[in-house]
């Protein structure tokens, strides 16, 4: 995680703790604990709808069970937690109609020296994995999800579209800041990509902000 972001989160927590300690003296500990939880959630959670955009339409029905299994992240508008990651693949395990687990697998380019920035052309790749929990909205077939990448921090995302055979799927945030294109196959036809990007452009996503999801080790 980026050090500046860690510092910002730490400062937000410190402010919340100080404020809630004051409330504890005035109103008691239970209300202070509730205050702390609400402050942390509102400070750390992402993302709400952008008032400059119309509501983002979601896929009408999503069979969560058919999303189970392995996926390749082919392109994305990254968040702060996956910005430096490459070769991302995910394994989805559905627990019930409303909850699922994600094994998030990725590579990082190892720095050769502390002074020299890493690039995709130099250094070697190191493989990593971590587990993320997710929950679907109320009702069977809901494409509105809440993803928990780190503790109480969550992302509000929704399924925007998917193929009839569930061979690919597009997930994005309501404010259009983040999006992921996932495919069952490791390679995707350019025609399919062009069609997805064309529709994302209509949905007011910044298509130019999408990044490819490949990296290759130094030979």
Image (cartoon, grey):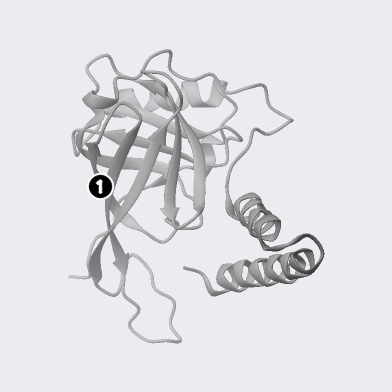
Q: Nearer the viewer, residue 219 or 206?
A: 206
> Residue 219: where, in percent of width, then height?
17, 70
Asked if one can make out residue 134 in the rendered structure from this viewpoint, the answer is yes
Relative image position of residue 180 (x, y in whole percent)? 40, 38
* Residue drawn at x 47%, y 42% as measured from the top left: 210
- Is 106 left or right of 16, judged from the image as shown? left
Q: Residue furthest front?
A: 28
Residue at image x 42%, y 19%?
A: 139
Image label count: 1
Q: Nearer the viewer, residue 192 or 104?
A: 104
What residue is at 29 percent from the left and 45 percent from the top? 102
**Circle 1 sits on which residue?**
89
Viewer can see residue 167: no
Q: Quadrant of residue 135?
A: top left
Q: Is residue 124 above or below residue 65?
A: below
Task: Say which residue appears at 54% left-offset and 18% top-offset.
Answer: 57
Residue 6 in the image: state x and y as whole percent: 56, 71
Q: Is residue 23 above or below residue 102?
A: below
Label 1: element kind: strand
Residue 190, compared with residue 117, is above or below; it is: above
Residue 52: x percent and y percent?
Answer: 73, 30
Q: Left or right? Give the position of 154 relative to 164.
A: right
Q: Residues within 10 Å of mark 1 (few under 14, many from 20)?
A: many
Q: Is residue 2 left or right of residue 53?
A: left
- Residue toward you, 135 or 7: 135
């Amino acid at each position: 995680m980026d050090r500046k972001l860690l510092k910002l989160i730490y400062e937000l927590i410190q402010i919340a703790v100080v404020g809630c300690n004051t409330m504890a003296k005035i109103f008691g500990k239970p209300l202070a604990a509730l205050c702390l939880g609400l402050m942390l959630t509102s400070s750390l959670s992402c993302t709400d709808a952008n008032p400059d955009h119309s509501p983002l339409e979601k896929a009408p029905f999503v069979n969560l069970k058919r999303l189970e299994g392995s996926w390749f992240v082919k392109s994305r508008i990254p968040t702060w937690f996956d910005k430096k990651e490459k070769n991302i693949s995910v394994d989805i395990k559905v627990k019930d109609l409303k909850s699922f687990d994600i094994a998030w697998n990725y590579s990082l380019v190892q720095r050769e020296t502390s002074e020299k920035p890493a690039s995709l052309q130099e250094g070697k790749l190191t493989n990593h994995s971590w587990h993320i929990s997710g929950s679907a909205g109320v009702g069977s077939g809901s494409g509105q999800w809440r993803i928990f990448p780190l503790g109480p921090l969550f992302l509000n995302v929704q399924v925007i579209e998917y193929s009839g055979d569930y061979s690919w799927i597009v997930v994005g945030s309501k404010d259009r800041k983040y999006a992921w294109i996932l495919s069952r196959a490791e390679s995707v036809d350019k025609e399919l990509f062009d069609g997805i990007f064309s529709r994302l452009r209509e949905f007011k996503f910044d298509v130019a902000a999408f990044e490819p999801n490949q990296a290759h080790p130094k030979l």
